[in-house]
Amino acid sequence: MSEAFSAWMKSIQVLMEEALGEFLPAPTEKPARLHEAMRYAVLDGGKRVRPLLVFAAGELFDAPKSELACAGAAVEMIHAYSLVHDDMPCMDDDELRRGKPTVHVKFDEATALLVGDALQSQAFLVLTEGEGDAVRKLAKVRLLAEASGSFGMCGGQAIDLDSVGVFLSRGELEQMHRLKTGALLRASVLLGAWSGKQLSSDETAALDAYARATGLAFQVVDDILDATADSAVLGKTAGKDAADNKPTYVSILGLSESQALAEKLRQDAHHALKDFGSAAQRLRELADLIVDRKN
Ligand code: GRG
């Protein structure tokens, strides 16, 4: 990773921490326990991959920073809500997330449920704030709703819950991940791009191809890390997929073929950006980061 990219990443992570802190209700505001738990779930943790994608795509189309901060905060709130709900006993039943006790462990189950619900509402509220005209905001609200609902992330999660102990073909596994993880990563890229100047249809298709390859690479690497890294490095419980008898890329393809697939997806992501030249360098480096990450 280049020094310039690393400095840019740090600056966006700092900017996003500040923006999220402002967009979330103050911990002193009533109901204080719910607001405290929402902030616990979102702040001080996470790689902020989705906001980084928002900014890298947005900068390519000269989008104003304030609008990107709204889009980045909205997508990160949806992501944080999904993690809080996913960790609950009725789903993955996990006690560690981002190196901290999960929300239902630190607070309680009812609070964790409400944290997810309230973060989801807050995300759409934030998307309506800041610059951009009403038509553009409406398009973004629709994009995020589709990506996070039953035809996106929630639909993927439903397939995931139904797949415990079930054999999935490679195609079925890919479809599950395209919805569960890929849809929100794709939405991040498009929310960023739609915050700037009008895209041509070729540019939209190229970004879509980039987002699809990067989104799938993210999940293939997630499966590799679950099988190979330890919990301290991951900040969440490692080895859970195998323990829960869940189909993964590693269980279907084996480790080395999964690693080769992640490499191919990296190449696909780079190839999709070929016509953007050096302006898309940050998107390329983000694809590299997603494939090379250790947690
Ligand atoms: C409960 C509605 C609902 C959906 C859950 C995304 C998801 C769907 C569940 C999370 C479970 C999981 C570990 C999925 C694998 C991919 C993933 C989203 C990993 C976590 O994302 P990172 O690595 O996390 O970006 P940080 O903490 O860095 O933000």
Image (tube, rainbow, N blue to C red):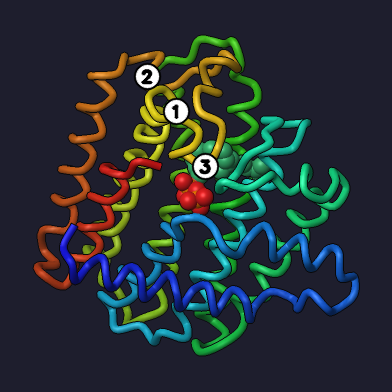
Residue 290 lies, with reference to residue 200, above or below; the image says above
Residue 42 picture location, percent across and down: 62, 61
Q: Amino acid at mark 1?
A: Asp
Q: Quadrant of residue 35?
A: bottom right
Q: Which mark is residue 235?
A: 3
Name the residue that disc number 1 marks: 226
Q: Mark 3, residues whose alpha carbon is within 10 Å: few (<14), some, or many (≥20)?
A: some
Gap in angstroms between the C-alphas marked 2 and 3: 20 Å
Is 79 on the left or on the right of 215, as rendered?
right
Marks 2,1: beta carbons within 8 A? yes
Mark 3, ligand 1, within 8 Å: the answer is yes
Q: Position of residue 279 (x, y in %)?
A: 16, 72
Q: CA distance from mark 2 to mark 1?
A: 9 Å
21 relative position to 285: left or right: right
- Residue lying at 45% horizontally and 74% vertically, measured from the top left: 14
Give the x, y percent position of residue 274.
11, 58
- If the picture is divided into quarters, which one holds ligand 1? top right
| Residue 112 position within the rendered picture, expressed as x and y whole percent measured from the top left | 79, 49
Mark 2 vs mark 1: which is more N-terminal?
1
Residue 19: image tag: none
- Whether label 2 lies within 8 Å of ligand 1 gets the answer no
Numbered disc in front, either 2 or 1: 1
- Secondary structure under badge 3? loop
Q: For label 1, count other residues whose C-alpha is less than 10 Å away and answer few (under 14), some (14-19) or many (20+).
A: many
Question: Which three-letter amino acid code belongs to the residue tagged 2?
Answer: Val
Residue 3 placement, left or right of 291: left
